[in-house]
Amino acid sequence: EKPFECPVCTRRFADRSNLKVHLRGHTGERPYTCDFCTRTFVNSSRLVVHRRLHTGEKPFYCEVCSLAFVTSHQRSTHMKNHSSEPAESQLGLATLNENETFWDPQSLVVTNLHNAPVAGKPYRCLHCGIGYSQASCLRLHILICGDVGD
């Protein structure tokens, strides 16, 4: 049950704190400020993730390949790549690795040398390995993940 309703857009929430954060989107209030830069956030958890970009902290590790990630969500998304590797190989789809990829900053597309699609997600962050089906999603991710040129 979601008893808390936004008076602006009527979206409903299970608890009052989520409604409070949501309302900040309507009011523009961003009470959490980064100590390293002037960026502000609507909630403290987004600030914590952002700070990791400054500190380099990546506390979530892949148990298969030891890649490190800023958020557990990034790791979970990355883990799907491991579970789909055999299926991709059977279909003849390319798998991404450092030797077979290049970055095209104009189109935000990471492509293998043979230009084969990668599981329907051609827009891939080279920093953390997460793939997206749309360039706009990758652009948004890059703001969170940081520099993809490393």
Image (cartoon, grey):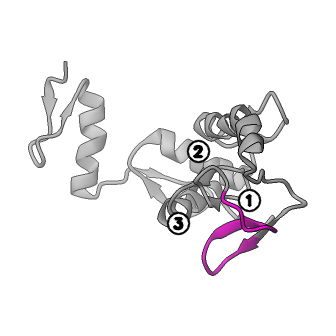
User: Distance of mark 1 from mark 3, alpha carbons?
Assistant: 14 Å
Magenta residue check for 105: yes
Q: Mark 2 points at which residue?
A: 49
- What is the residue that sits farthest to the right in this orientation? 99
Image depth: mark 2 or mark 3 in front: 3
User: Residue 67 appears at what percent x and percent y?
Assistant: 81, 41
Crowding at dot 1, Cα within 10 Å, few <14 / some 14-19 / many 20+, comes out as many
Magenta residue check for 14: no
Left or right, residue 20 beside residue 47: left
Image depth: mark 1 or mark 2 in front: 1
Task: Indicate which disc, 2 or 3, sits on the residue closer to the N terminus.
Answer: 2
Task: Please give the range of residues in magenta.
Answer: 103-117
User: Residue 121 appears at what percent x and percent y?
Assistant: 59, 55
Q: Name the residue under label 3.
A: 135
Q: Which mark is residue 126?
A: 1
User: Residue 41 appears at what percent x and percent y?
Assistant: 43, 52
Instruction: Say how many tags the image has.
Output: 3
Examine the image and state in which quarter residue 100 appears.
bottom right
Q: Which amino acid does label 1 sit on?
A: Leu
Relative vertical location of residue 131 with respect to residue 38 in this rendering, above or below: above
Task: Assess whether mark 2 and mark 1 are in contact (beta carbons under 8 angstroms).
Answer: no
Task: Pick whichever, 24 or 84, lies toward us.
Answer: 84
Location of the C terminus by quadrant is bottom right
Q: Which amino acid does label 3 sit on?
A: Ala
Q: Which residue is drawn at 24% across and 24% down?
A: 14
Relative vertical location of residue 137 with respect to residue 20 in this rendering, above or below: below
Relative vertical location of residue 21 with respect to residue 27 in this rendering, above or below: above
Q: Which residue is drawn at 16% across and 28% down?
A: 4
User: Distance of mark 2 from mark 3, alpha carbons?
Assistant: 22 Å
